[in-house]
Image (tube, coloured by chain):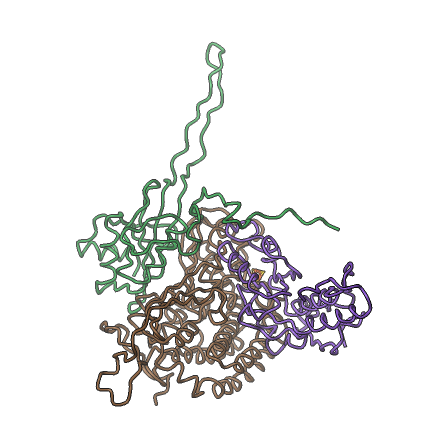
Chain colours: A purple, B brown, C green
Amino acid sequence: MGLFERNLPDIYLTRLADLAVNWGRASSLWPMTFGIACCAIEMMAVGAATFDMDRFGAGAFRATPRQADLMIVAGTVNAKMAHVVKRLYDQMPEPKYVMAMGACTVGGGPYWKHGYNVVKGIDKFVPVDVHVPGCPPRPEAIIEGVRFLQRKIMAKRVLAQGVETKPDFTGVSVSPGTVGILDPTVRPTSTVYRAPTALGFLAPSGGRA
Amino acid sequence: MADPMTAPAKPQIEPAKPQTAPARTLVLPGDPRPPDVHVDVRTQELQINMGPQHPSTHGVLRVAIWVDGEIVTRAEPDIGYLHRCAEKIGESVSCIQYVPYTDRYDYLAAMNNNLGYCLAVEKVAEIDVPEKAQYVRTVAVELNRIGSHLMAVGTYGLDLGAFTPFFYAFREREEILRLLEWICGARLTYNFIRIGGVMRDLPEGFAADTRKFLDLFETRLDEFNDLLTHNHIFVNRTANVGVISPDMAIAYGLTGPNLRGSGLRYDLRREQPYLLYDRFQFDIPVGTGIKGTVGDCWDRYWVRMLEMKESVRIVRQALDQMPATGEIMAKNVRHLAFKSKPGEGYLGIENPRGELGYYLISDGGANSYRSRIRAPSFCNLSILEAILPGTMLADAVAIIGSIDIVLGEVDR
Amino acid sequence: MTAAEALEQLKKAGLGDGVELFAGPKDAALLVTRERVKQLLRHLRDSRPFSCDLLLMITGTHMTEKRAPDKTTPDGVDVNGGVVKGTTVKGALLREAGFEVIWHLRSVAKHHLLAVKCRLPLADPRVDSVADLWPAADWHERETWDLLGITFTGHPNLRRILLPESWVGHPLRKDYVAPKEFEGINLEVDAPWPTP
Ligand code: SF4
């Protein structure tokens, strides 16, 4: 927003403008196609038919960092890869967001002890907005991460001055993906999420329709 | 056209042929020169960097490609962007603890990796696995093989610009994942096959559901064939591209569908039956050059499609033959205080990508002294250097996709 | 064909010197001196009874010295009532320090698997490259150099393959210490997050 970035008086009009801008940003998060390891397969699954992240406005996977807003770092980052991840992050245009997907990117995951080559957590070199733990996280968890990020974006100030309010995360958490997965009598079915209504995440009570 | 199932395999060892010129070179109408002479003007050599962030390299492979105009003159794969210290970890944690790590190397065929490691440990530590557990393992492994091949063909379509088959493949794959999730609780990294047996018996109703799925799946495979396999554009982009001769395949250590795509009927499930594969009837499909030359990209793709059918057959037979009750874990394995016997051994199994081997040295402790993984993708990938030169740049994507690598396994 | 049969065949062909049988508790292998490695592997590839055309893998192991536990006799009392110090006898050498390199070969036509093994001294781990016999050996040898530091003489391009070019050390050696940092990237484990 250039010159006006957080530079205008904190009045109703600028707040309204912020809301509009944030709504635009939050509902069209374009992730970068950037899979590193096993987690990338779940990232692909979340883009495919069953889970369909497009319902949340985050399904347009772009192949180049210059068209993407969201970098989902899906997989183990090692010493050789870290520079590449950093460079990709630098190439993304503002505003940009990073999701650390999987235990590896959160803190080294299974490789934290004997992985001489593994970076134990990508927050050592890029700023991370959402951490999604799991090895790999279920697709539902990624969707949940995206929705956390959307709430976070909604709380941002774009034009108006002043202190940012804390994001409102109520109602974002979705129930665990499958019921009774360790109960052999229950066959897992994927939890079907209905997309929130178009303005769903604006409502304080959460977006589940 | 010969049926690929019944056509005899090519003779196994052929006299060495000189590498023929790439099949697709530009020929202008009325040009008297033989078709293997490049008619376009030579241009300045240009280096193109493909990856490590590239949608068609299936992960974090980097290939440095030198091109002259549109024609690749040299290619050099650069790997190691996903090196995760597999072998060091294999020495540092106990054999029991290492099983979940094996899931993460070939994450598309995690069951197969579990199986390979467990079989190798069982060989060194002399553990006998009960029959029922072996059937359960077979079912799990073959379902996983279908899932892995679905991923391979689905993303192969994606690489070549066909977006829809990817969704169809993933629809089927989700069904398989749900079945596997039912037996072990995880979608991708299963840790289901344990040293000495399996984690748990198949749940009630699993066999019926699996059969229902298999029936459906066979019809859907035909749908997939209509959609992609015989698609004119797809055939044009893959037939006669990236031809690997049988000699070359062996020299570069290719195994699995890539070797069979070159016309060699070689499958470890038949050569050295492990588990109970000698009790099942199944065919080993090989590439016969239906659409082009034997050993081209289309053949490798087609071998995977046919292998899925064979896996369906194996799962059906395993479900039929499986005893209703029985032990699922060997008696003499003490999981908390596991100690192997001293010794060393190599054991190879047929992973969806080729021969997955584990070479273990044990000096009698809980950890193995050395654990080396013979990763099929690692060996298969090394052929890129040899087959990319001379092809068009756009075909590089088709060739890399047809080799079906998993970078987790290449770099370990 | 087992390793023992292979050795018989080799002896018949007059290539048996320098080759012994390594009979481990599980898999057996042909143990060969390092001067003979390349000749033997070429023979295994080319001669009809073996025709080991598929090179499965090449790998190495760092063997640390292993001894039986030391024996100490307890302190005793001599005839005059003085104390006699007990003696310590070093345990027998069970395993010498050094490197082992192993080649696994498979014959596609004859359906057998053979392993060839070679022991190298710790100070000078070098052995002939077979990259000109099997193109497949190229990457395996690079990997073995990368992770273990075994030099393959005659390899056309012996560079690191998995680790970055400027990495220091060979991680699969048993005395390897993991670095704390690499080119500005911190590789240490964070302190645990404070619990809220
Ligand atoms: S978190 Fe687990 S599944 Fe994800 S990349 Fe790491 S090891 Fe693989």
Residue sitting nearer the eye, A2 or A133: A2
Q: Which percent across, then down, holds residue B253?
A: 34, 65
Residue at x 49% of width, y 11% of height: C81
Q: Is residue C36 visible?
A: yes
Question: In the picture provided, is C18 more to the left or to the right than C80?
Answer: left
Relative height, residue B308 to residue B60 (above, below): below
Relative height, residue A195 to residue C119 (above, below): below
Residue at x 31% of width, y 54% of height: C116
Q: Is residue B327 visible?
A: no
Q: Which percent across, then down, holds residue B408?
A: 49, 62
Q: Which percent across, then down, holds residue B175?
A: 59, 77
Q: Quadrant of the N terminus of chain A?
A: bottom right
Residue sitting nearer the eye, B250 or A184: B250
Q: Residue furthest left?
A: C14
Relative height, residue B37 to residue C175 (above, below): below
Q: Quadrant of the C terminus of chain A?
A: bottom right
Question: In the picture provided, is A165 more to the left or to the right than B137?
Answer: right
